[in-house]
Image (tube, grey):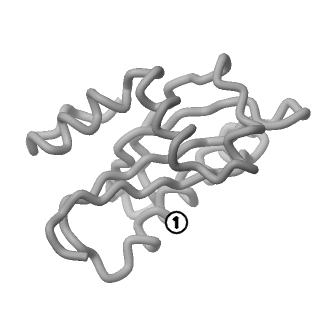
């Protein structure tokens, strides 16, 4: 697991959403109905949330979980990222996390899993 964040907002986010009942309530409130109805919350599992890319630069996803999704035995990775500031292209960072996850799965000869990124922003700017 990643090192404990120094930022109190990050620490609060990580500690709060690490609790399965809070994460489930959040997803039931904010995820699209077509997605949340297919998630088997009884299979919710916390995953490793740090990946190292080929340039040996570490990238930290705040929280990563896996769940069974739909009728098939498919794992869906829920990638949760917290931002307290605006960023012009946050989707690049989230895509990097997903690519690092998939590269790690390929290296370990595991099947690739779909990902559901969730970006939580609580800053002052719109």
Q: Is residue 62 left or right of residue 117?
A: left
From this viewpoint, which residue is outermost toward the bottom?
Answer: 88
Q: Is residue 26 left or right of residue 1?
A: right
Quarter assignment of residue 125: bottom left
Q: Position of residue 41 (x, y in %)?
A: 64, 24
Q: Badge 1 is on which residue?
A: 95
Which quadrant does the C terminus fall into? bottom left
Q: Position of residue 48 (x, y in %)?
A: 46, 32
Against 4, residue 116 (above or below) is below
Against 63, residue 94 (above or below) is below
Q: Position of residue 112 (x, y in %)?
A: 74, 47
Residue at point 22% right, 33% down? Answer: 3
Q: Is residue 102 left or right of residue 87?
A: right
The answer to which of 56 and 71 lies nearer the viewer is 71
Q: Give the secondary structure at mark 1.
A: helix
Which quadrant does the N terminus fall into? top left
Residue at point 66% right, 30% down? Answer: 67
Residue at point 46% right, 38% down? Answer: 26
Against 72, residue 125 (above or below) is below
Residue at point 52% right, 49% down? Answer: 30
Assess disc 1: are there few (<14), some (14-19) or many (≥20) residues with their C-alpha within 10 Å of its C-alpha: few
Against 52, residue 3 (above or below) is above
From this viewpoint, which residue is outermost toward the right?
Answer: 71
Q: Position of residue 73 (x, y in %)?
A: 85, 30
Q: Is residue 5 left or right of residue 114?
A: left
So how many labels did they put on this image? Answer: 1
């Amino acid at each position: 697991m990643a090192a404990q964040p120094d930022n109190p907002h990050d620490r609060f986010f990580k500690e709060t959403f690490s609790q399965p009942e809070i994460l489930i309530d959040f997803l039931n409130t904010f995820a699209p109905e077509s997605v949340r109805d297919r998630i088997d919350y009884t299979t919710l599992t916390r995953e490793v949330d740090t990946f190292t890319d080929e340039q040996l630069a570490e990238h930290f996803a705040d929280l990563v979980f896996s769940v069974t999704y739909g009728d098939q035995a498919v794992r869906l990775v829920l990638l949760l990222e917290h931002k307290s500031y605006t960023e012009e292209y946050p989707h690049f960072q989230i895509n990097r996390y997903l690519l690092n996850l998939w590269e790690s799965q390929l290296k370990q000869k595991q099947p690739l899993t779909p990902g559901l990124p969730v970006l939580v922003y609580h800053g002052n700017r719109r």
